[in-house]
Image: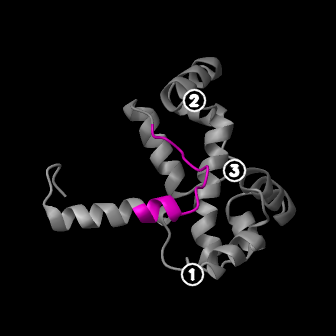
Amino acid sequence: MPALYDQSDGALAQLLLCELQLAPSLPLFAPLPRDPELAGLCRDFLAQPHIRSLPENWARQLHRSQRTFNRLFRQQTGMSFAVWRQQACLMAALPRLLSGSSVTRTALELGYDSPGAFSSMFRKVLGQSPTAFVRATTRQGKTAKPWFAD
């Protein structure tokens, strides 16, 4: 939609804003860095997230020391590697859970030691268990492809 939109586009913009106000807000984001090499590693991770991915391996791939990597990662994303990795894994878990994957399967696919460890992290970040989240989301009629499934 162009910046200077007509009346019908204005109605659409108002509807979108209204829907966004009503939508539940999830504290999830995994920003991509501007550094091209680091961004490439982040994109690869987002395609196949695994909670056991180690920052030491990323540092080695970028030919940097662990300390330099940690500084670069925080500077480029605004968060530590561990927090970013957790957010990315959680963002990958939501569409899986909402499409019917079990908590156990989702947890193991993402590299968690157990469904309990995954559920504990999920509850800490989103304030409810994965099962409760799925139930609440589907009860609200939000079973269509969610915004975070892209």
Q: Amino acid at mark 1?
A: Gly
Residues shaded magenta: 18-32
Crowd tier of the residue under label 1, counting other residues whose Cα lies within 10 Å: few below 14, some 14–19, many 20 or above: few
What separation in Å lies between label 2 and label 3 (alpha carbons)? 18 Å
Foreground pick, 148 / 128: 128
Q: Is 123 situated left or right of 21 in this image? A: right
Tell me: residue 38, above or below residue 24: above
Q: Which mark is residue 51?
A: 3
- Residue that mark 1 sits on: 141
Few, some or many residues within 10 Å of mark 2 (<14, 14–19, 20+): few
Q: Where is residue 137 drawn, in percent x and y?
A: 64, 74
Task: Find numbered disc 2 in the image and state the secondary structure of the residue it sits on.
Answer: helix
**Mark 2 / mark 1, whichever is N-terminal:** 2
Give the side of residue 10 with respect to residue 123, left or right. Answer: left
Q: Residue at x 57, y 35 (%)?
A: 58
Image x and y of residue 96, in percent:
61, 71
Label located before the other in sequence (1 or 3): 3
- Quarter of the picture containing the N terminus is bottom left
The magenta stretch spans residue 133: no
- Asked whether residue 129 appears in the rendered view, the answer is yes
Residue that carries the numbered disc 2 in the rendered image: 60
Q: Look at the numbered disc 3 and give the secondary structure of its residue.
A: loop
Camera-nearest label, 2 or 1? 1
**For the residue marked with disc 2, what is the amino acid?**
Arg
Q: Identify which residue is drawn at 76% across, 73% down.
A: 131
Q: Nearer the viewer, residue 130 or 34?
A: 130
Q: Secondary structure at mark 1?
A: loop
Residue drawn 78% across the image and 53% down it: 121
- Front: mark 1 or 3: 1
Queried whether the magenta region covers residue 19, the answer comes back as: yes
Three-letter code, disc 3: Ile
Using the rendered image of the protein, determine whether residue 150 is visible from the camera's viewpoint. Answer: no
